Amino acid sequence: MTDHSPEQKEMPFVQHLVELRGRLLKIILAVGLILLVLIPFANPLFTFLAEPLLRFLPETASMIAIDVISPFFTPFKLVIMLSIFLAVPAILYHIWAFVAPGLYENEKALVLPLLVSSTFLFYLGMAFAYYVVFPIMFNFMASTAPEGVKMMPDISRYLDLILKLFFAFGVAFQVPVVTIVLVSMDMISTESLTEKRPYIIVMAFTIGMLMTPPDVISQTLLAVPMWLLFELGLFIARLLQHRKQSASSTDKSTALTMEDSSKQLMHQDPNDRDKQ
């Protein structure tokens, strides 16, 4: 069928490489432009990022820089990573533009909404980590410091921790997208996912244990959203599966009706056919 064929003929391998090179250069250019804009605001951005911790430090305590180059390098590292995070829409767009010519129409209809929702969920995961997880986690850590111990975190280690958590929550919030893709590609059924729900919940808490600091609060705050997002993805996958089955049933009914009509016409008397 014509609506299920790729839009373009197969391109030569060298042409694919040229196209890939162009897309990678555009991605690097997008990241570089964002980086140039953010560099003058490196220190204020780090202060904003450290605010969930600073608010729970004792009045006489502050963050420290152990290494000599940390006061310069740590904010600079932050704006580099932030530039990559902010360039995610451009990165996904160029990935989409590169693979789109080889996709079928039904695949394009599925992939584009998934790319948009994936970007939104990644940013939502980062926002959840900053506004919900960080205050609870740092308040807990500051309150458990032994008497006589002054909490004075190193800025470099703090940045490494929060970048790891940003990435963990951004990836964890992709669970609905992964669930929908697996069901849509018929790699697994919604019934099978429903049966495996207890194992998936255990897996969510295991991932939370591995990707967060060794405290129950942060582990739970990662595992519970993963479980709820899995349920959301399972619900949407059921709706899409039901719509697909309904469309398939309609097509079969239409085909059977046309087949019955053609059979009746073939068995009809020629004189009656001429009258019609």
Image (spheres, rainbow, N blue to C red):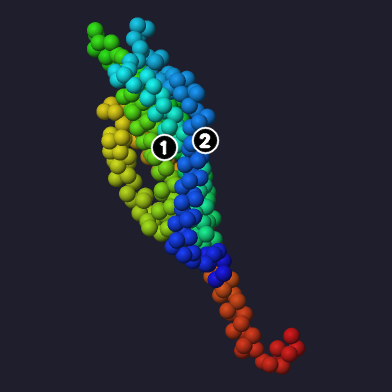
Residue 229: image location, x then y, percent: 42, 41
Quadrant position of the C terminus in the picture:
bottom right
CA gap, disc 1 to disc 2? Answer: 23 Å
Query: Is any atom of residue 14 visible in this view?
Result: yes
Estimate the x, y position of residue 118 in percent, counting from the top left: 47, 43
User: In the rendered image, which quarter is residue 1 located in?
Assistant: bottom right
On the question of residue 242 being in view, the answer is no
Outermost residue toward the right? 275
Q: Amino acid at mark 2?
A: Leu
**Front disc: 1 or 2:** 2
Instruction: Choose between 254 and 207: the one closer to the eye.
Output: 207
| 185 versus 172 height, above or below | below
Instruction: Confirm or deny contact between disc 1 and disc 2 (CB under 8 A).
Output: no
Q: Which residue is mark 2?
A: 33
Which residue is nearer to you in this view: 102 or 201? 102
Q: Which residue carries the number 1 mark?
A: 170
The residue carrying pointer 2 sits among few (fewer than 14), some (14 to 19) or many (20 or more) residues within 10 Å by Cα, namely few
Q: Type of residue at label 1?
A: Gly
